[in-house]
Image: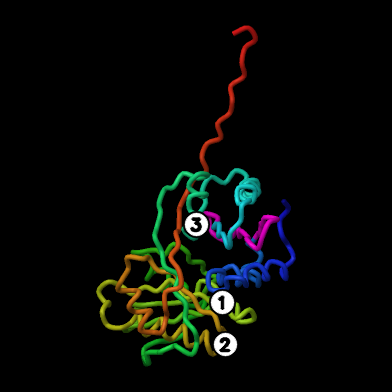
Amino acid sequence: MPQLTDPHLIRERLEADRAWAAFALADLEPPYSAFASWFCPTDGPAIALLYRAFATPILLCVGTSRNWDAVLDEVDIALRDVQDVYAVVRPETLPLIKNRYASNDERSMVRMVLEPGHHRPVISDGACRLGPDDLEAVQRLYLSEPPDFFLPSMLTDGLYYGIREGEQLVAVAGTHVLAPALGVGALGNVYTRSEHRRRGHATALAGAVTSEMIRSGVTTIVLNVREDNHSARRVYERLGFNGYCSYFEVSASRRPVQRLQPTTPGV
């Protein structure tokens, strides 16, 4: 079951569930594509993405198949000596992951999606565009609560907005992935310093990033949020986002391989 390398065939499988596969669709485009490997079964439109831009590889499963085990065997070969993986899966695929890997942390999540015509932006004079020169300020802001997935390159390849009070950056929001050519983008890494919360900063910045994505031609805008983070979900709902599906993010480790001990003749 070889890796799939034809971007047209990969996209064909991902488009079957565009809102769920939005991150993966973006990973077909540079610079994300350099870190993406694709694995697929032979019995249907399912596909697995192994994304290796971060210290822990991300495994995303899209679609259904009777042959997921064979696909994941190929993923394990690709991982070689890597012990940990971060799996992003729908509920129907979760048992398969838990049978294969030891779960260290399991989060119930919600994928939310925004149709551009439903966007309700919040106007804020304080929101300003950030870029590579703001990396130190962004890293300093994230220091107390580091996001799970942030790379300095996101300030170059994506969209980031922030709010300052004096010289200090106190709130930020950006994109995990942005691929206008494919019409997809993902809002993420929204954070406000604790003493500056409840002032509407998160809503204003998420709205600014979302508005900019729409202006750039993105038609499928998604985000991920913890199922129990009701305050964040209300912020996104005010902007026009709606729940699309529940899923799980699982930080997991490969189970040790049980090897048979050689037997001694006559024993």
On the rendered structure, is 204 left or right of 7?
left
Residue furthest to the top in view is: 266
Which residue type does callout 3 highlight? Glu
Measure the alpha-carbon separation of dots 2 and 1.
10 Å
On the rendered structure, is 65 left or right of 208?
right
Callout 2–callout 1 Cβ contact below 8 Å:
yes
Residue at the spot 57% in from the left edge and 46% down from the top edge: 82
Which residue type does callout 1 highlight? Leu
Residue 210 x %, y %? 47, 84
Classify mark 2: residues with Cα within 10 Å, few (<14), some (14-19) or many (20+): some
Callout 3–callout 1 Cβ contact below 8 Å:
no
Classify mark 1: residues with Cα within 10 Å, few (<14), some (14-19) or many (20+): many
Quarter-of-image position of residue 193: bottom left
Residue highlighted by disc 1: 178
Q: Is residue 49 above or below residue 83?
A: below
Residue nearest the viewer, comparing 92 with 261? 92
Tell me where the magenta segment starts and ends, as one range: 37-57
Tag in front: 2 or 3: 3
Residue highlighted by disc 2: 216
Q: Is residue 53 magenta?
A: yes
Q: Main secondary structure of the magenta part?
A: loop
Measure the alpha-carbon separation of dots 2 and 3.
35 Å
